[in-house]
Amino acid sequence: MAEHLSQSELDYPFKLLEYFNGFRVSKVIFSACELGVFDLLLKAQEPLSAQHVAQELGTSVDGMERLLDALVGIEILEVEKTDGTASYSSTDVANLYLAKGSAKSLHDMIIYQSQTIYPLWNNMVDAVREGKNQNEKTFGLPAEEVFQAIYRSEEEMLKFMGLMNSSWVLDGHDIATAFNLSGFTNIVDLGGCTGALAREVAKAYPASSVTVFDLQQVVETAQKHFSQENDAIIFQAGDFFTGEIPAADLYVLARIIHDWPEEKCLTLLKKIYDICTPGGGILLVEAMLFENRRGPVMAQLFSLNMLVQMEGRERPPSEYTHMLNKTGFHNIQVCRTGKSYDAILAIR
């Protein structure tokens, strides 16, 4: 920190105070999403007073006014004052990413962050002390059964699947086009959840067959809540740890390897190597750390999240390369997208 914060920070810690208050900024956005502020403002198509918003959403006028002012302060809303009355409206960014109805909405991601991740992070001190996830302390569920915690009810499963869907609506195209995958005609997305990333892959490579392989209850929920008309992808139910993996010439593992300790990852990668057709490959999608341990900050925060919620960690490219080489893969290529997630392609 001493290398990066300016001399003026010693005189008054502006940046540190900004960091300290980061959780408050997050909660301002989370609360507005949960209350439906952005949906109401998008639907209204005109500036609304705090009183109007409060009445529509069933809140106190005082509380809503303070929330709206904070959203203006962080430049997510705009305000105009006429004859002593403040009227609030959404920015283009809020309409695109924070309202439910937008094609690029991150609403589901925000709800998951607020209602699941935020409570877990309240126990970060214990996670660091103990070196294990805090599902038991937070939700009363065994630390060893991480997906039992994630899928502990249909409502929780939908929240998690909404999070994953939002992630790939945002980053899916960059991942699908990080490498030229047109030579792979049979692609299986292992743990592909709602199919959002698989759809981006199918869109980029229409000549390829793309299958989502996930647990039975995930497949059923995806088909019930996230299906699309004329869907270009296929769903298949199974467990890639305990059951058979369908044959393919490219396997996609997106945000899967980071869930688990190295030994379990090696077991899965070797299983994939053994069934993968010669000349086929594997595409890993993760938030990769820098080798010098200086970032990216987002990946470092994701790695802490793996500590507090799962059994794994985020890794630099060298560690993924080591695991891939150890299980037989070669010709390893790394693509940093400059966004949330990066890609590694390896050939059998």
Image (tube, rainbow, N blue to C red):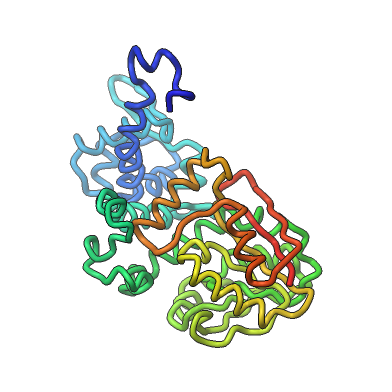
Horizontal and vertical percent for residue 24? 30, 37
Q: Residue visible at 48% across and 41% down?
A: 297
Relative placement, left or right, of 17 versus 162 is left
The residue closer to the viewer here, 192 or 49, is: 192
Picture quarter containing residue 204? Answer: bottom right
Q: Residue at x 75, y 66 (%)?
A: 205
Residue 291: where, in percent of width, then height? 58, 45
Residue 103: name its quadrant: bottom right
Residue 230 seen in the figure: no
Q: Quadrant of residue 71?
A: top left
Q: Nearer the viewer, residue 251 or 205?
A: 251
Could you tell me if residue 180 is visible in this image?
A: yes
Tally of marks: 0
Q: Which residue sits at x=31%, y=32%? A: 20
Q: Position of residue 328 (x, y in %)?
A: 68, 72
Quadrant in the picture for the N terminus: top left
Q: Is residue 126 above or below residue 165?
A: above
Q: Nearer the viewer, residue 200 or 45?
A: 200
Is 254 situated above or below 225?
A: above
Q: Nearer the viewer, residue 275 or 219?
A: 275
x, y percent for residue 57: 27, 48
Q: Residue at x 38, y 28 (%)?
A: 79
Q: Residue furthest right?
A: 183
Quadrant containing the C terminus in the rendered view: bottom right
